[in-house]
Each structure stands twice: as structure tokens, then as C-alpha cells.
Image (spheres, rainbow, N blue to C red):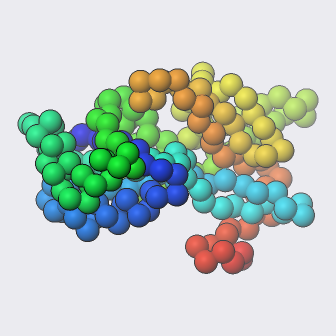
Amino acid sequence: MLWYLFKTWVGREKELVRMIRRTVPPEMYQECFVIEQERIWRKQQRSIVHMELLFPGCVFFTCKEKRFPHSFLEYLERIPDVAQWTSCGVLTIFPMMREDAEFLTGISGADHVVRLSSVKKDPDGRICRISDPLASCMGQIVRYQFKKRYAMVRRRLWGEEQAIVLGIMLEEDGERKCLVTTNGHTC
């Protein structure tokens, strides 16, 4: 399977996904999606889980077409809406390396959502246990920010060094977790 990265302006990701789904024939691709992640807000001593984009400005596109990737890109750029976005500088399309696609699939799964990683500290405050997806980045973690509930991972992605922020959950978050729903209401 081939993956493509569609870089657009931050805030226009969902519009781009809708445009691709509307204009590109379904037989030409497998999926067009954004990768989201769970994050925790700490508010009034409560842990509130919400969703946010893992890579703002990025849309991912997968297809089974393996024989003619260049003509496939040319085909995409001949679609009037795609051509308009690329000519205005609103959209740039990059083929992705297999390693990058495997990493993103590994941390986000089939639903394209990076779940919270559980981090457990011992009585001295040292980390003694980490769950996936963060555990798969073990040698690349450069910083933990426990108060803001994230870990920063440095990794080569798309041909350059990237800082990726992944949400974490501590033991005390387990009992007082609340989810922000799509309409903004908490449960």
C-alpha cells in the first residue's frame, strides 16, 4: 500500500478530506484521513480527555496503486479542485516512505487515533512502566511533562527530525477521567 502526505494550511484538514472524498473516484484510493490523538486537560483536579490532531495541516491518503505512482500523482493533480489548491500553494503532495507509514500505523492503529499511554511512576518519581503507543518509541522519548500530561518524542519522519507530542495518563487520571464529546459536552 502506498501512503501520501497532503500538507495544507492548519485548520483546513477536514475541508481537504471532504474535497478528496467528493472528487477522487473511490476506486483510486483506500483511505483519506487525519490522525487524531487523545490528550488530557487538567481542570479543577479532574482529567478531561479530548481529541486533537496529531499533525496539524496534514492529511494522509492511502492507495493500492503500486505500478504507476507517478502517473497516480499526475492524475490527482489533474482534478480541478486539487489543481486549484496546489497552484495556490494551499496543498502540497508528498509520497511517504514505508517506514513512516509503518510507524504511523503502529501508533494510531486502524482507526487513526493515537490513544493515551499509561505511565506509572515508582515512589521515588522514576518511571517504571509505560504502555503503548508510547512504549514503541522508548528510545526516542526526550521529555515528559507530567503536569500537562504529554511526552515528547524525537523521531525522523518525512525525511527530517520531528518532535511529536503524545498524550499520557497517570494513575491518578484513571478514576477521574471525563471525555469531551464531539459536541463539546462532558460526561
Above or below residue 138? Residue 69 is below
Is residue 31 shown left or right of residue 181?
left
Residue 7 appears left or right of 49: left
Residue found at the far left of this picture: 67
Label total for image? 0
Please give the name of the residue rendered at 36% of the width and 28% of the height, measured from the top-left corner. Answer: 99
The vertical placement of 18 against 63, above or below, is below
User: If the image is split into quadrants, where does the N terminus sit?
Assistant: top left
The image quarter in which residue 143 lies: top right
Q: Position of residue 62 (x, y in %)?
A: 27, 48
Q: Residue furthest front?
A: 88
Q: Residue at x 52, y 45 (%)?
A: 55
- Residue 86 makes an appearance in the image: yes
Q: Residue at x 66, y 74 (%)?
A: 184
Residue 111, above or below 5: below
| Displayed quadrant of residue 121 | top right
Position in image of residue 144 (x %, y %): 75, 34
> Relative to residue 14, is residue 123 depicted above or below?
above
Q: Residue at x 20, y 59 (%)?
A: 80
Residue 36 image offset from top left, x and y in percent = 52, 54
Residue 5 % position (x, y): 36, 42
Of residues 121 and 51, the one drawn nearer to the viewer in this rendering: 51
Is residue 114 something one can see in this rendering?
no
Q: Which quarter shows the C terminus?
A: bottom right
